[in-house]
Amino acid sequence: MWSEIAQQISQITRRPFQIRDRRSVGGGSINQAYSVTDGDRAYFLKLNQASQAAMFEAEALGLKQIAESQTIQAPGPICWGIAGGSAYIVMEWLEFGYGDESAWRLMGERLAAMHRVQSDKGFGWDQNNTIGSTPQKNPWTEGWVEFFTEYRLRYQFQLAARRGGRFPKQDALLAAVPHLLAGHTPHPSLVHGDLWSGNAAVTQTGDPVLLDPAVYFGDREVDIAMTELFGGFPAAFYQGYEAAYPLEAGYPRRKILYNLYHILNHFNLFGGGYGSQANRMIDQLL
Ligand code: ADP
């Protein structure tokens, strides 16, 4: 497997590459991660079961989409596929450092610039991807209310039902989405889609970077909402973002609705107390 991957890297980069050192990298939740180097060039590599090859392909295309926006850095994908019975993705290796206030302000400004990249095909993306390891459907849809109701909330509720989740007010919540989003007409912005703190980093040279995206074109507020879900980003990030692209009135309530998607997904991935957290959020919204 390793030599096959090294061969792919050589082919794509048009320079011979041999793995001389390989180290396991911690911190990932879903995949096994490694650094590989020939002593000169280094790459970041993730492995999973062969059945997850489509997940890595969608991640590679998401990283490319962010890179093409020329607004904020993301590790460039090199190659992906199946080798020796495992799915893999190889991308540019980045050295992360401590992000000071100015780096986090820049992160906010650059994310705002990414959000100004908008689709003329509506809400969705050219392909489905995953959120964690859960499938995420992105069919092009004209209306945001329909997109978020059907392909974000209802889809997660359906998965949760199969897992034995009980959400007594699910139908009332789904029916209330048009009301909760009334008067709000977001543009289809390029969003990261899974923007918790583990997926935002700063390089040793002070450049903000987005990792592990679940991109689509959606309401930009989904990204800001998620940054607030697990502890929040540094204050400078929000200052930078607001100065570049202010949020609209009514965001604090929509934040709960948008984060319900991620809490339902956490219930589907990890179970536990996330089910009752989702029910509390539904009560808050109704
Ligand atoms: P998973 O998909 O399993 O959640 P991540 O993409 O979050 O894995 O990566 C796991 C860890 O590897 C992260 O905590 C991050 O610090 C590090 N990492 C991610 N991408 C790179 C990269 N391009 N270069 C160096 N380290 C990286």
Image (cartoon, helix red, strand yellow):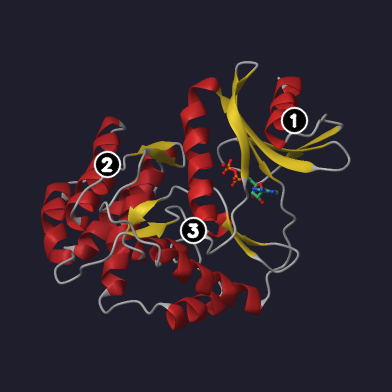
Which three-letter amino acid code belongs to the residue tagged 2? Pro
Which residue is rendered at x = 87% and y = 31% of the image? 20
Indicate the secondary structure of the residue bearing disc 1.
helix
Q: Position of residue 43 (x, y in %)?
A: 73, 41
Left or right of 142 in this view: 238: right
Visible in this render: residue 166? no
Q: Callout 2: few (<14), some (14-19), or many (20+) C-alpha neighbours within 10 Å?
A: some
Indicate the secondary structure of the residue bearing disc 2.
loop
Indicate the secondary structure of the residue bearing disc 3.
helix
Label 1 vs 3, first from the N-terminus: 1
Q: CA distance from mark 1 to mark 3?
A: 27 Å
Displayed quadrant of residue 77: top right
Do the CB atoms of the residues marked 1 and 2 lie less than 8 Å apart?
no
Which three-letter amino acid code belongs to the residue tagged 1? Ser
Frontmost residue, 214 versus 189: 189
Residue 139 shows which numbered tag? 2
Label 1 vs 2, first from the N-terminus: 1
Left or right of 240 in this view: 122: left
**Quadrant of the snapshot with the C terminus:** bottom left
Frontmost residue, 16 versus 215: 16
Residue 10 shows which numbered tag? 1
Displayed quadrant of residue 145: bottom left
Q: CA distance from mark 1 to mark 2?
A: 35 Å
Which residue is rendered at x = 62% and y = 47% of the image? 76
Do the CB atoms of the residues marked 1 and 3 lie less than 8 Å apart?
no
Say which residue label 3 marks: 69
Displayed quadrant of residue 184: bottom left
